[in-house]
Image (cartoon, grey):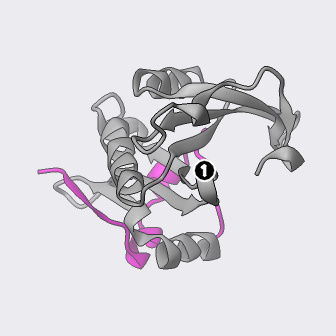
Amino acid sequence: MTTLRPFTCEDMLRFNNVNLDPLTETYGLSFYTQYLAHWPEYFQVVESPSGEIMGYIMGKAEGHGENWHGHVTALTVSPDYRRLGLAATLMNLLEEVSEKKKAYLVDLFVRVSNKVAINMYKNLGYIVYRTVLEYYSGDPDEDAYDMRKACSRDINKQSVIPLSHPVRTEDVD
């Protein structure tokens, strides 16, 4: 049976099969441990019956006032386990945590070239709020979509009214 459980330090020694995907943003171990220490409820893993990590989500709560929100820092599923609904399950979990924390919205950044992920997020109710120019470094740098979904606290859905113009990374709050 597939298990959804909190991410642990030991998982950092076992998640290379997921992190080696070219569309997965990877970070240093200290970054993962910082998230694990500060926002453990936002850091979850899906594990196969054999103990293999199938995917994980890492996020946090941030902002102030009406910008208080849940943020998806990383969501990834191993290529062997895609199209099984695991990403949607992980997103729903993060949204539930954000609702409990009285967030106004959940947001995430995704490469504009990652059409599969963009379509998945749209199917989960996310909208493209704005384009962030040159968000992802590379050769060349790549733009990102800031995608958002309002939580129940945002009764009038003010947090998901799209901007009409792109922004630069230094303008992202």
168 or 74: nearer the viewer: 168
Q: Residue at x 39, y 47 (%)?
A: 95
Q: Quadrant of residue 79?
A: top left
Residue 116 higher or lower than 95, as above or below: above
Q: Quadrant of residue 139?
A: top right
17 or 47: nearer the viewer: 47
Query: Does the rendering let one see residue 82?
Result: yes
Q: Position of residue 54 (x, y in %)?
A: 33, 49
Q: How many marks?
A: 1
- Is 16 one of the magenta-colored residues? yes
108 or 4: nearer the viewer: 108
Amino acid bearing label 1: Glu
Q: Residue at x 41, y 66 (%)?
A: 14
Q: Could you tell whether 72 is left or right of 97 in the image?
A: right
Q: Position of residue 41 (x, y in %)?
A: 38, 66
The residue labelled by disc 1 is 66
Q: Residue at x 58, y 45 (%)?
A: 24
- Is 162 one of the magenta-colored residues? no
Q: Residue at x 86, y 45 (%)?
A: 171
Q: Position of residue 97 (x, y in %)?
A: 36, 56
Q: Could you tell whether 122 is left or right of 86 in the image?
A: right
Q: Which residues are magenta?
A: 1-28
Q: Position of residue 13 (x, y in %)?
A: 45, 71
Q: Could you tell whether 117 is left or right of 130 in the image?
A: left
Query: Does the rendering let one see residue 43?
Result: no
Q: Secondary structure at mark 1?
A: helix
Residue 66 higher or lower than 126, as above or below: below
